[in-house]
Amino acid sequence: MRAAGQGSTQGRLTSKTAKRKIKNARKLAEHLIHKLT
């Protein structure tokens, strides 16, 4: 992880959205699993 002044904020934003996407995907997967069982 480099603290490059130019791309630091952009990288932080992308990581934040990626984490949110992963969380949403996990929630959706759990929902589907509960429906199947």
Image (spheres, rainbow, N blue to C red):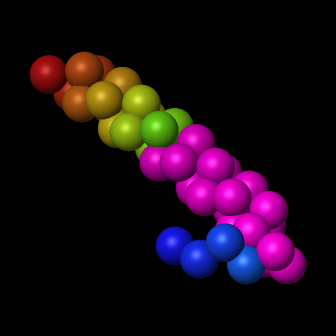
Residue displayed at 66% across by 51% down:
17
Specify the quadrant of the image occupied by residue 35. top left
Q: Residue furthest left?
A: 37
Please tell me which residue lies in front, 25 or 32. Answer: 25
Residue 23 among those drawn in magenta: no
Residue 14, image quadrant: bottom right
Q: Position of residue 12 (x, y in %)?
A: 69, 58
Q: Which residues are magenta?
A: 5-22
Q: Picture coordinates of residue 6 (x, y %)?
A: 85, 78
Majority SS type along the magenta span:
helix
Identify whether 32 is placed above or below 9: above
Q: x and y percent of residue 20 in the render? A: 58, 42
Question: Is 9 rendered above or below residue 19?
Answer: below
The residue at the point 79 percent across, 62 percent down is 9
Q: Quadrant of the C terminus?
A: top left
In the rendered structure, the answer to whether residue 34 lies left or right of residue 4 reads: left
- Is residue 24 something one can see in this rendering? yes
Q: Which residue is farthest right?
A: 6
Front residue (pair 2, 9): 2
The one of 25 and 13 positioned closer to us in this rendering = 13
Q: How many numbered marks are there?
A: 0
Residue at 42% x, 30% y is 27
